Image (cartoon, helix red, strand yellow):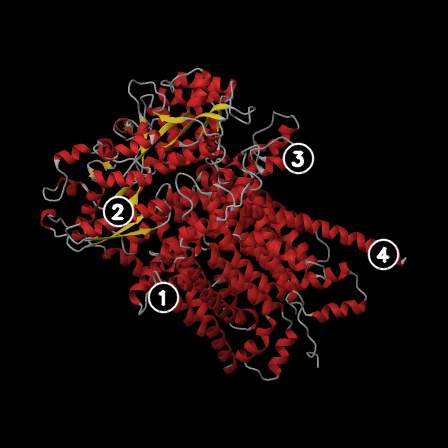
Amino acid sequence: MESKSITKRRWLLGAVYTGLSISAVTATVPFVWMLLASFMTRGETLRRVFAPSEIQWKNYLLAWEEADFGLYFENSLLIAALQVSGTLLFSLLAAYPLARMEFRGRDIVFAVILATLMIPETVTMVPNFLTVSWLNRHSPFAWLNNWPALTVPFMGSAFSIFLLRQFLRGIPLELWDAARIDGAGHVRFLFQIVLPLCRAPLLTVGMFTFIGSWNALGWPLLVTNTPDWRPISVGLLQFVSEAGAEVHLQMAGAVIATIPVLLVYFLIQREFTEGISMSGLKG
Amino acid sequence: MKKDIKEEAIAWAFLLPALVVLTAFGLFPIVYAFYVSLHRWHIKKAGFVGFDQYVRAVGDPDFVYMCLLGAALIWLGVRLRAKLEGDGPAPSLFSRIVPFVLALPALWLVVRGLNGLLETGDRQLYNGFKVTLFYSLGTIPVQLGASMLLAYLLFKSLRGKGFFRLLFFLPYVTPVIASAVVFRIIFSPHPSSLANRFWAFCGLEQQRWLFESKSVAVLLLQACGITDYPAWVNECFPSLALVSITLYNIWVYIGYDTVILLAGLSAIPRHYYEAAEIDGANAWQVFRNITLPLVSPTLFFLSMVAVIGTFKAFNHIYIMRTPGARDSVDVVSIAIFDQIFQYQNAGYASTLAFVLFITILVLTFLQNSVLGKRVFYGE
Amino acid sequence: MNKNITRLAIGAGLMALTYLVACGEAERSTTVVVDIEQVDPSSQEVVFWYQHSRQREEALVELIEEYNRTNVHGIKVRGEYMGGYDDIYNKMSVAIQGGTLPQLVVAYQNQALAYFEADGVVDIAPYMRSKKWGLSAAENADFIQAFLQQDNNKGVQTGFPPNRSMEVLYYNVDWLKELGYARPPVTWDEFADMCRKAKAQPFSKSTDKEHSLGFFLELDASRLATMVFTRGGDFMNADKTAYTFNTPQVRQALQLMQDLIREKAVDIVSERYMDQQEFGVGKALFALRSTSGLPFFKSAVADGLDFAWSVSAPPRQVDDPVVNVYGASLSLCRTTPAQQLATWLFVKWFTQPQQQARWARASNYFPVRKSTANELKEYLAENPGYAAAFKLLDYGKSEPAVQGYQGVRKMIADAMVDIAEGGDLDDVLSNLERQANKTLERF
């Protein structure tokens, strides 16, 4: 009896690993090709060879210099840092009342927040530019060609608010009630008790905001005129010209652009492991 | 009472920062788009035309009224049936006949209305909706199902799960410009493209992938040797080009969904699992009775976001569009883009955008009423 | 209570914002007729938005810096990379509606028309005609008139050409010799014969003798334009009021392609730049492409089989050669009279032969003034492909420059797909004509 269930378990485990491996391969093949292509010559990318005959390290040097990657990198980091902090703060603050507080108009506000997600970006760029332009004229500091235009419009992220609200609603009621009985006010409750519980969702929101900010292209192009505040995505754009895309350089640039994001993900992905230990709560 | 007002004040204070930003950069554009859609507008406003552009987009208003009337009758029928059946223990003949009597003309109205709209409205817009629908239905179930499975597997103690998690997330992390270009190369019609090589490896004839505007159903029939088929086989199924783009979307978003689900799974307090173990539940029971309900808010979130996202989808579709695919991959967002950049017509583009907005709004509302009730919020 | 007040506040805020935006448009100044002769352009700053990147941008910046150093008026030009053509259009749209306009912008003809309609750019003709600042009769005659005409819509010069490209026939000299021909095809019939022969007899150096044909047709309106122009036809009628696609020239062009595709002597381009690639490895005898692709063809052949190749005028059915010439132009934005004049002076300088020669060498574009040939003697000697195309500049013809043409281009591409797949010419072309003319109604 015992051995039968062990073999069954082993068989199941084996199947799981095979399935995962196949999926993993499918997930990474394009990225692998991208990596390989970044080391090819232009001719090789056009001939679609599997691997470059010679590793063209110079592609990376060229991509870095030609597209001003040093400056753009800095800009991307700064913009991302600002956007992530702002978004996390605003979204958590907004998600809290939407999740667990009772007040009139709560559902309508939530519906309206969601509605802002539903309009395609192509038509939001113009009115948003007009708003930012107006703010530029009537503000003590510059909005255009500066960090405010690049970060503030995204700090009211309906997506982040929605995600955090779902998580907060999933936290058991007992927790809320227990704290309230103890006499905690909302602010204290939010920052002392709820915040630590929300590490995984907050990190998730932070990471997705980071990625969104890192890869944004249309909006940064619109609100910047000079390279001073341009992010890395604009740098990548320069390898696409009218008479022929230089795939090998584009790929090298893309790899350079992807590495920081992977780093960030790698650093925080450990947070997704265990569930929250609730010991001491029932007491 | 005083406490309630204080509660409300705090609630609004918390909401204020996000709301200010959202109003300026999220709501205002919607109002603006509506304003623009009422005018002839290339780069600058050039004349008020009221709802003319909406009529051009959606079709003759008479047909719109027909559809609405039909929908109202159906709703009435459903409500009546519920009310009548709620009275007695068993459904009577009366309670069945009345809704039925209402349903027939209602359905006729809706069908006639839709038909009329398709004929008098903008073909590009309706084609856009059809393509968007195929695209949505193709990606969302696969995405969600696969990522739920993956998230669950990666959550449990499994060796190398950190490594696997990194790999699955790679597609989402890569800039779209790069990964879409790579997919364009993989799914190119050239005989030496990866897709064709793989297809040849499976013993099948090479395909034109992103360049193929014929529907997958037609290709299947052709592979079986059938060359005579009615036109609807081509019209009512997605093209191979669209399927290729759908595969790309699934590839990108499985990682994304998995990461979010993992976060959701991590937020489930351990003591639930411990209690279940003590009770002697097996893996499937734990999954069904504890994990699934407790992760349902996250799943609900993902499905909503997926619907909104796929209906708005643009970037990668634009990169992977080829002349050969004709309009079989032109989702509504692409029609909007074309109006602005190919016809320099911002007014009509805003009309289409607003129609899309209303559609997504209605869909989300429906989704919420149907699925929202099944979400378990820990109460 | 609180919620209602907040709702009202939000609503009011929205309305205020909308009102402000609507008012913002009124701030733009109305047309004031200014005497150009009296305007003083000294020390003006000119902001120039373009899509050039990398090497081309470097060359352009060098030219700009030289102008800043050497011009007598103290005019300072500043160049800014603004993304691709669509990105620039987006930026101009918002700038016209409520932002700050640059002084000079790169725009395609149909975009310039939209800008002009929105009062974003001004008519350049008065500047060209000005006694003090304009072009002399000799200078004017030196310009290739067809290029100036392309940017002229009913007497209004909405743009000024800084450079042009044209569509030429790239051909494999060695392979042609093997097939028994000493020169490239002059007529479309000769072209068809050569394609058939190429299919039957692959290039001796090719490593893939299974796949060999004459030509990969790109499903793009510009290719069709070349085929139609070289038969003496056009896409529009004489006074440019309607599109004409169901004409003998268009039919002949597409019929020939359909036949050749059926015979497998021609195939369609199914992946961007594959025609360049296949040409480079000797699997296609010809390619029909823009001259701005010359350096890419050079590297494709060098990476490939390294054979002798050249360019010529496309095959034709009329006496003189005809080439499809295209390119974006420079538009003068509506700013202040002094800035506009300063901008014109920069454009005038940029289109002088010495600068044109430098720009041509660096960018691979073609100059718009005939006398530039004198400055380019060495370059022409070193680059036979470029030189061969240079001689064709006088024979240029261009595609329609009306609003909405971009959308019609897509319709044409769709029609080409239909025909390549064996569609009925009559049906497809009359449909195309009808749909294209519908777009004209909207303007």
Q: Is residue A105 left or right of residue A128?
A: right
**Circle 1 or circle 3, nearest the eye:** 3
Q: Is residue B102 left or right of residue C47?
A: right
Chain letter behind tag 4: A
Check if mark 4's residue and mark 2's residue have beta carbons within 8 Å.
no
The residue where tag 2 is placed is: C63
Chain letter behind tag 1: C
Q: Which of these two is toward me, B18 or A12? A: A12
Q: Residue furthest bottom?
A: A183
Chain letter behind tag 2: C
Type of the residue with mark 4: Ser
Establish if C205 lies above or below B312: above
Coordinates of residue A31 in the picture (x, y in percent): 57, 48
Chain letter behind tag 3: B
- Which numbered disc covers residue C12? 1
Asked if badges 2 and 3 are on one and the same chain, I answer no
Label 1: which secondary element? helix
The residue where tag 3 is placed is: B201
Asked if badges 4 and 3 are on one and the same chain, I answer no
